[in-house]
Image: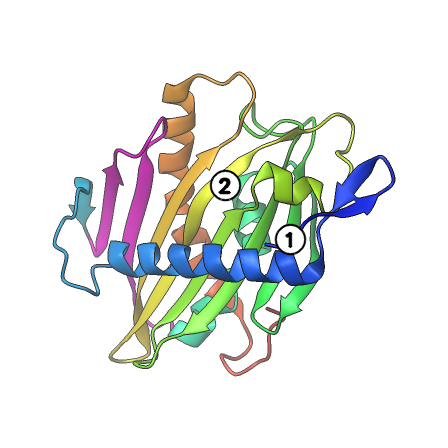
């Protein structure tokens, strides 16, 4: 990575360095997501199934201080293109918490690679209250047509180099890993795998964070309703 560029008393990161870091980090995230979707035949691979039934599986895997949670859903009459239109950082964050105050694209590094800011306010739940996340979003289509959306926070040092001042002393949390794998099934249906591991930072009990992470993977049902409301699967959508 290039040396940081001086910006007065602080420093900023060059766009080339930012792009190369995010390309590397997002490739690793994509491989983790594909592995979690079991496309590689890894079996459970450390995942413990919590619930299973009606085409829905909920699992968790121990990973550092906070568990990683996974949900896998069979969505009937929802095509991959329909679902992928709403499977993005901003639409997902709107389902996480009604206290979302700001959700905007900061920078497009490539056609399928963007930097996004998510900011939650005073009215959010305790784990989101006065918190913000600076994340990348990368979208890829595999050779077999499987669609992948990888979303994760930039490291604090990289985020600081973007020269984005915190709003109202907000705590900058970390979306350690998250994203979607959307596989086509027959009859315009799809299998959706969603993985999330979030550290809200600040003083929050680990058990509460793990409970939050478990609830976050349930937003597929809300996104399914948004996808069904999309006028057409062929409509262009900003990535």
Residue 224 in the figure: left or right of residue 130: left
Residue pictured at 44% horizontal, 75% vertical? 81
Quadrant of the rendered image containing residue 187? bottom left
- Give the magenta range: 54-79
Task: Give the labeled residue for mark 2.
Answer: 175
* Image coloring type: rainbow
Quadrant of the rendered image containing residue 100? top right
User: Where is residue 89 drawn, in percent x and y?
Assistant: 55, 54
- Above or below: residue 64 compared with residue 52: above
Q: CA distance from mark 2 to mark 1?
A: 12 Å
User: Where is residue 198 drawn, in percent x and y?
Assistant: 45, 36
Q: Determine if the magenta segment contains residue 119.
A: no
- In the image, 88 versus 61, the foreground residue is 61
Dot 2: element? strand
Instruction: Give the mark nearest the N terminus, 2 or 1.
Output: 1
Residue 28 in the figure: left or right of residue 96: left
Task: Give the labeled residue for mark 1.
Answer: 116
- Above or below: residue 170 compared with residue 185: above
Residue pictured at 33% horizontal, 30% vertical? 64
- Above or below: residue 208 compared with residue 118: above
Residue pictured at 43% horizontal, 46% vertical? 177
Q: Residues within 10 Å of mark 1 (few under 14, many from 20)?
A: many
Q: Is residue 33 something one can see in this rendering? A: yes
Quadrant of the rendered image containing residue 43? bottom left
- Above or below: residue 46 compared with residue 186: above
- In the image, 115 versus 74, the foreground residue is 115
Q: Quadrant of the C terminus?
A: bottom right
Q: Are marks 2 and 1 in contact (CB under 8 Å)?
A: no
Q: Residue furthest right?
A: 8
User: Where is residue 112 drawn, in percent x and y?
Assistant: 56, 70
Residue 134 in the figure: left or right of residue 64: right
Q: Determine if the magenta segment contains residue 61.
A: yes
């Amino acid at each position: 990575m290039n040396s940081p560029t001086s910006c007065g008393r602080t420093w900023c990161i060059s766009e080339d360095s930012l792009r190369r870091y995010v390309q590397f980090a997002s490739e690793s995230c994509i491989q983790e997501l594909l592995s979690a979707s079991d496309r590689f035949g890894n079996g459970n691979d450390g995942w413990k199934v919590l619930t299973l039934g009606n085409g829905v599986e909920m699992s968790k895997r121990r990973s550092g201080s906070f568990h990683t949670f996974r949900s896998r859903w069979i969505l009937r009459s929802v095509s991959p293109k329909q679902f992928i239109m709403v499977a993005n950082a901003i639409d997902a964050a709107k389902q996480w918490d009604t206290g979302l105050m700001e959700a905007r694209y900061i920078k497009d590094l490539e056609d399928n690679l963007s930097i996004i800011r998510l900011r939650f306010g005073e009215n959010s739940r305790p784990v989101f209250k006065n918190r913000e996340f600076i994340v990348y979003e990368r979208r890829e289509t595999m050779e077999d047509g499987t669609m992948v959306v990888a979303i994760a926070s930039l490291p604090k040092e990289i985020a600081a180099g973007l020269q984005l001042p915190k709003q109202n002393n907000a705590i900058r949390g970390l979306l350690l890993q998250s994203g979607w794998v959307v596989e086509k099934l027959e009859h315009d249906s799809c299998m959706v795998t969603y993985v999330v591991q979030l550290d809200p930072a600040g003083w929050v009990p680990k058990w509460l964070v793990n409970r939050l992470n478990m609830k976050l993977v349930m937003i597929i049902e809300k996104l399914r309703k948004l996808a069904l409301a999309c006028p057409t699967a062929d409509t262009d959508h900003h990535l």
